Image: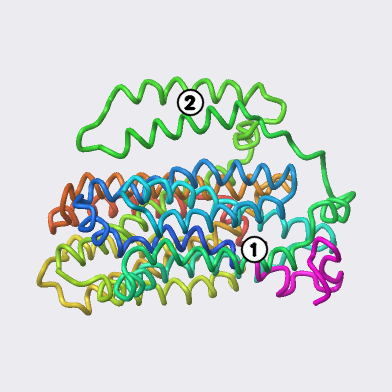
Amino acid sequence: MTGPASATGPAPEAGFGARLTAPLLLGSLLNPLNTTMISTALVSIGHHFGIGASSTVWLVSVLYLASAVAQPVLGRLADSIGPRRVFLAGLAVVAASGLVGAFAPGFGWLIASRLLLGIGTSAAYPAAMAVLRSESRRLGRPTPRTVLGRLSFAALGSAAVGPTLGGLLVATWGWRAIFAVNVPLAFVAFVCAMWWIPKDDGQRAAAGAGATREPAGLDPLGIVLFTGTLTALVFFLLDLSHPVWWLLGPVAVLAAVLTWWQLRCPDPFIDLRMLGRNHALARTYLRHGLSYLVIYCVMYGFTQWLEEGRGFSSLHTGLLMLPMSVAALVCSLLGARTKGIRAPLTTAAVLVTAGSALLILASGATPVAVLLITGACFGIPQGLIGTSNQAAVYQYAPADAVGSAAGLQRTAQYIGAITASSLIALAYGQRASDGGLHLMAAVSVVLGLVLVALTVSDRALRARNRK
C-alpha cells in the first residue's frame, strides 16, 4: 500500500480484485442492513416513547421513502460527476445519521436520523455498479458474474442477518445501538474507499472510447417531480386504515406532469422512452418490487408478531429469524454461480407463496420448529431474488446509465417495502395480533401467485436461459 487511490489508483493488473471490491461491498451492505436491523428494535422504541406500531412504522417508511428517491438521484450523480465522489459523500452522511440517532432526545430526532440514513446509504449501490462498469470498460471485458454476486451477497446477506444482529444489539446495549453501529462501519468504508477506489477523472479517462455518449445532465425538474409524486403516494399509503383520499389528486397530477416532462426532456431523469422499448428491464423492476413487498411484510410483520403475539424477547426473535438469515446467505452465493435467471426466480416465487400460506396457519400454539421452517421459506427467495434481478438489470440496462438503472431497481424495491409497511400498519393497528398476521399472509399469498405468473410468462428470461 503506497498511498490513496486518488494519488496512484490500484494497479492495472488488479482488475476486479479485493482492493476494488472491498469498499464497494462494505458500503453496499449499509442500506439493506439498516432496513432490516431495526425490525427487532421497533417494539423497544415504541415502549420507550410510549407509542404504538402505527407510529413506529414511520421509522421504516421514512428510510424507504428517502432511499426510493435518493437511489436513482445518486445513481444519476454517479454517472454524471463520478461514482467515487458520490460514494464518499454518502458515507459521511451515514456517520452523521448514526450520531443523531444514538443521542436522539425524542422520537422526531429518530425520524430525522432515519431520513439522513436513507439518503446516505443510497449512494453506495448505484455508485458501486458504476465503478464496476468503468472497470469493465478499462479492462475490455464484462464484469464477472461472481463479482456481481459478491455485491449482491453483501446486500442480501446484511439484510438477512439484520434481524438477528438487531436483536443482539438491542438485548446487549439497547435500541440506540441500532443507530450507533453505523458510525464505525461508515468510517471503515470511507477509509477503504479513499485508498482503493480509483479517482473519478482516472476512471473516465480509462473508459475512453468505451463511453457511448457524454454523461447526462441531472434534470433537476424531473427529480423534483419524481420526489413530489413518490412522497404524496407514500403519505397516502401510510394510513390505509383511514385513507386521505384527496392525496390521490396530487399524485395523479404530479405523475402526469412528470411523464410529460420526461418525454420532452433531452436527458430525462427517468428515461421513459427507453423503458417503453426495454420491456425486459421494465418487467425486472416490476418483479423486483413485488417480490420485496412480500418479503418485507414478513421481515417486519412476522418479527413484530413474534414479539407481541407470541411474547418472545428481541434476542429470541432474532434467533428465530436466524434460519431465514442463513438460507438467504447460502442462496445468494448459489444464485451468483447460476448462469440462468428464470429458474431461480421461479423457485423463489413458489417458496414465497408457500411461506405466506404457512403464516395463515400460525397462532400462539404453533410449534417453534414450524416457525423456523416458515422463516427459511422466505430466506431462500430473498437470496435468489436479489442476485438474479441484479444480474438482469446489469444485462438489460444501457451501458452508460448503469448507475441510475441500479438506483431505479432499488426504488422499485423500496416502493414494495413502503407498501409492505402500510399493509402491516393496516393489519396490526396498535398491536400485532394473530388476526392481523393472517390478513397480511392472505394478501401475500395472492401476491405470490401473481409473482409466479409474471416470472413464468417472461419470455426475456427464457431467452436469457438459452444463452
Q: Secondary structure at mark 2?
A: helix
Q: Residue at x 57, y 56 (%)?
A: 462
* Residue numbers of the magenta segment: 1-25
Disc 2 marks a residue whose amino acid type is Ala
Residue 50, position as x, y percentages in the image: 19, 52
The N terminus, quarter of image: bottom right
Q: Is residue 455 visible?
A: yes
Query: Front-most of 252 and 50?
Result: 50
Query: Front-most of 466 and 123?
Result: 123
Q: Let me know if residue 18 is in the magenta part.
A: yes
Query: Which dot marks residue 255?
Result: 2
Q: How is the image coloured?
A: rainbow
Q: Residue at x 13, y 54 (%)?
A: 435
Residue 344, position as x, y percentages in the image: 49, 65
Query: Front-most of 391 and 8?
Result: 8
Give the labeled residue for mark 1. 190
* Residue 137 position by quadrant: bottom right
Q: Secondary structure at mark 1?
A: helix
Residue 18, position as x, y percentages in the image: 71, 75
Residue sitting farthest toward the left: 365
